[in-house]
Image: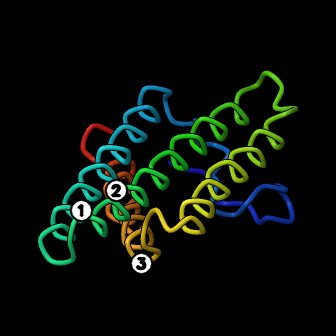
Amino acid sequence: MRRPRRSLATTGIHPMIDPAEPPPDESEVVATIRTVSLGIAASTILLAVAAATTQGARFAVGVLTGGGVGLLNFLLLAGIGRAMTRPSGSGLWGLAYLFKVLVLFGGAFLLLRAGVVPGLGLVVGLCALLPGIVLGGLRAAPGRSGR
């Protein structure tokens, strides 16, 4: 029998986190990150093929660039998040996150400013994050068989 949930005021923990439930196994976290990454990559490729057939090669390069920026951003954010939740110190990870944002989005800005890729293509590529995140969420959802 599960213990009744305590209020945020008595636990000091976010109400969606059940302190009685053990944290997910590291292999489950890695598998979920892999699922999201593959979903983002597959969505990016599908969107790029569609863009190449309807809008041309330059637009498709923009889609691939946007999807690549989104995938790299997700992977770096996942690595930083995993490192911050480990018991061994998380001291400089906030600075690593700031550096990540500056490099990724600064690079995207420079690509747009130089006119290397069309802005709309970059945005379409960034939209490839959504299906990947949904796939990862479905994979990690409680109530899956085997949990």
Q: Is residue 67 above or below residue 75?
A: below
Q: Is residue 10 above or below residue 3?
A: below
* Image coordinates for residue 105, horizontal then vertical, percent: 64, 58
Crowd around label 1: few <14 · some 14–19 · many ≥20 (10 Å): many
- The amino acid pointed to by label 2 is Leu
Q: Residue at x 38, y 66 (%)?
A: 130
Kindly check if marks 1 and 2 are in contact, taking CB atoms under 8 A apart as contact.
yes
Q: Residue at x 62, y 51 (%)?
A: 104
Q: Residue at x 67, y 57 (%)?
A: 106
Q: Which of 105 and 17 is in front in this view?
A: 105
The Cα–Cα distance between marks 2 and 3, rounded to whole angstroms, is 12 Å
Q: Residue at x 43, y 60 (%)?
A: 66
- The amino acid pointed to by label 3 is Leu
Tell me which label, 2 or 3, sits earlier in the chain: 2
Render colour scheme: rainbow
Tell me which label, 1 or 2, sits earlier in the chain: 1
Q: Nearer the viewer, residue 140 or 102?
A: 102
Q: In the rendered image, which residue does mark 2 sit on?
A: 64
Q: In the rendered image, which residue does mark 3 sit on?
A: 120
Which of the image's four quarters has the C terminus? Answer: top left
Side of 52 where 134 appears, left or right:
right
Quarter-wise, where is residue 100 in the image? top right
- The amino acid pointed to by label 1 is Ala
SS class, disc 3: helix
* Image coordinates for residue 44, horizontal then vertical, percent: 29, 57
Q: Residue 48 shows which numbered tag?
A: 1
Q: Nearer the viewer, residue 91 or 117?
A: 117
* Image coordinates for residue 125, horizontal then vertical, percent: 37, 65
Side of 132 where 21 appears, left or right:
right
